[in-house]
């Protein structure tokens, strides 16, 4: 959702999409770097209640994240 808003010129977003995916969307991207010029990397937590029913789009997103990042 955030990426779609940014694609429409309605803001900015931090994205975990690949550079190629962003290029295909026609958006400008900027790799964040620290003061030494190294890529900025941090651990990110993805938290959700696995016991509750979720809309199909949420289930699809969770599946994408689990597959893309080999999360079990």
Image (spheres, rainbow, N blue to C red):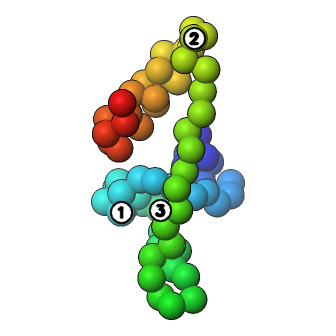
At a point 47% along the width and 62% down the height, the residue shown is 27
3 vs 1, front mark = 1
Q: Which residue bears the numbered disc 3?
A: 27
Q: Which residue bears the numbered disc 1?
A: 19
Give the percent coordinates (x, y) of residue 46. 55, 39
Gap in Å between the C-alphas at discs 3 and 1? 10 Å
Q: Quadrant of residue 21?
A: bottom left
Q: Quadrant of residue 47?
A: top right
Give the percent coordinates (x, y) of residue 22. 40, 58
Gap in Å between the C-alphas at discs 2 and 3? 36 Å
At a point 53% along the width and 62% down the height, the residue shown is 42
Whether residue 25 is visible, yes or no, is no
- Mark 3, other Cα within 10 Å: few <14 / some 14–19 / many ≥20: some
At a point 45% along the width and 76% down the height, the residue shown is 39
- Mark 1, other Cα within 10 Å: few <14 / some 14–19 / many ≥20: some
SS class, disc 1: helix
**Which quarter of the rendering shows the N terminus?**
top right
State yes or no: discs 3 and 1 in contact (Cβ < 8 Å): no
- Mark 2, other Cα within 10 Å: few <14 / some 14–19 / many ≥20: few
Give the percent coordinates (x, y) of residue 68. 33, 42
SS class, disc 3: loop
The one of 24 and 2 positioned closer to us in this rendering: 2
């Amino acid at each position: 959702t955030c990426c779609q808003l940014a694609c429409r010129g309605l803001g900015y977003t931090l994205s975990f999409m690949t550079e190629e995916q962003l290029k295909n969307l026609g958006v400008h991207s900027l790799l964040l770097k620290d003061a030494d010029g190294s890529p900025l990397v941090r651990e990110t937590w993805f938290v959700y209640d696995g016991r509750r029913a979720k809309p199909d789009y949420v289930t699809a997103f969770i599946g994408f994240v689990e597959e893309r990042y080999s999360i079990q």
